[in-house]
Structure formats: structure tokens, C-alpha cells
Image (tube, rainbow, N blue to C red):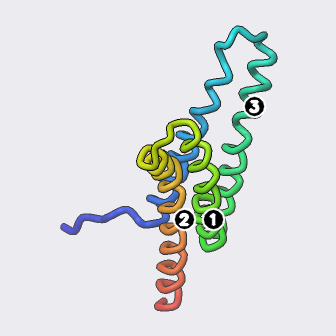
């Protein structure tokens, strides 16, 4: 009996959603600062804007894997300098800043690569049929 491995498509989708969920957790810092609840909710929704953009990219990747994969890779690469600059200014450590970039952005780049692999794998399978 052969063991069936998950497809790149499934792994890409799970990884992308997990990474979006992780980024969304940072929006929770909008609560608990002694502000009125309506201001906290407004701040929370503003903090979720990047997550909404990432969800749009996910839905594009869900329907069009090649385009979505490219978008996810570009999101990861385009945000790296900005995140590095901000974190380096806070902690003055190259290693720590690179670790933060890797933690935040590598899942998006890997998911993008997996979406592209899935696209070409599906295209190859359709040609063989």
C-alpha cells in the first residue's frame, strides 16, 4: 500500500492561510490600551488591512495558481527591505532582523513557490491525459 503525500496545491493553501492567520494575530495589539471600545475596534480593523490584502492574494492564488504564486513571492520579497529597516532600527541587530524577516515572510515565499509548482504539475498532468 503506497502512502499518498499531500499535493503542492494543498500544502500551499494551508501554509498561506496559516501565514495569513499569523500576521492577523498582530492586529490584536489594538485592544487593551485604555481606549474606548469603538476606537479599539477601529484600530483593530485598520491593523487587519494587510490581512485583507493577503486574503485577496490567497483567493487569486486559489483560482489562478501561477498568478497567485507570483503575487505571494512578490509580497514576500517586496516587504523584506521595509520590515528589515524597521526591525533593525528597533533592535540594532542584523541577525535578529533577518530572523524576523524569515519568520514573517518565508511562509509567503514558500507558498508562492508551491502554488507555481502546483500550476506546472497540473498543466503537465493535463497534457499527459
Find residue 39 and report its image quarter.
top right
Residue named by callout 1: 74
The residue at the point 57 percent across, 33 percent down is: 25
Task: Indicate left or right for 83 with 100 as reference.
Answer: right
Where residue 127 sits: x, y (%)? 52, 90
Q: Give the mark, 3 or 2, whose residue is nearer the N terminus.
A: 3
Where residue 57 sits: x, y (%)? 67, 57
Where residue 17 sits: x, y (%)? 54, 48
Residue named by callout 2: 112
Q: Is residue 44 above or below residue 69?
A: above
Task: Indicate left or right for 85 with 60 as reference.
Answer: left
Q: Give the mark, 2 or 1, whose residue is nearer the N terminus.
A: 1
User: Element type at marker 1?
Assistant: helix
Task: Indicate left or right for 6 with 83 as reference.
Answer: left
Query: CB atoms at circles 2 and 1 under 8 Å apart?
Result: yes
Is residue 14 visible to the viewer in this orientation of the structure? Answer: no
Count neighbours of disc 3 (C-alpha within 10 A) and say few if under 14, some if 14 to 19, many if 20 or more: some
Count neighbours of disc 2 (C-alpha within 10 A) and say few if under 14, some if 14 to 19, many if 20 or more: many
Taking the view exactly as shown, the residue that stands out farthest to the left is 1
- In the depicted view, which residue is nearer to us: 104 or 68? 104
- In the depicted view, which residue is nearer to us: 123 or 22? 22
Dividing the image into 4 quarters, which one contains the N terminus? bottom left
Query: In this figure, what is the number of numbered marks?
Result: 3
Residue named by callout 3: 45
Query: CB atoms at circles 3 and 1 under 8 Å apart?
Result: no
Mark 2 to mark 1 CA distance (whole Å): 9 Å
Q: Is residue 53 above or below residue 78?
A: above
Q: Which numbered marker is on residue 10?
A: none
Count neighbours of disc 1 (C-alpha within 10 A) and say few if under 14, some if 14 to 19, many if 20 or more: some
Q: Is residue 105 above or below residue 129?
A: above
Is residue 45 visible to the viewer in this orientation of the structure? Answer: yes
Where residue 69 sits: x, y (%)? 59, 67
Amino acid at each position: 500500500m503506497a502512502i499518498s503525500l499531500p499535493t503542492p496545491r494543498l500544502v500551499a493553501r494551508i501554509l498561506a492561510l496559516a501565514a495569513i492567520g499569523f500576521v492577523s494575530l498582530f492586529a490584536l495589539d489594538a485592544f487593551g490600551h485604555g481606549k474606548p471600545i469603538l476606537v479599539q475596534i477601529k484600530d483593530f480593523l485598520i491593523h487587519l488591512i494587510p490581512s485583507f490584502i493577503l486574503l485577496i492574494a490567497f483567493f487569486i492564488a486559489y483560482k489562478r495558481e501561477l498568478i497567485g504564486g507570483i503575487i505571494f513571492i512578490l509580497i514576500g520579497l517586496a516587504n523584506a527591505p521595509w520590515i528589515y529597516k524597521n526591525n533593525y532600527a528597533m533592535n540594532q541587530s542584523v541577525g535578529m532582523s533577518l530572523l524576523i524577516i524569515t519568520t514573517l515572510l518565508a511562509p509567503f515565499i514558500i507558498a508562492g513557490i508551491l502554488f507555481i509548482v502546483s500550476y506546472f504539475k497540473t498543466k503537465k498532468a493535463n497534457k499527459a491525459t
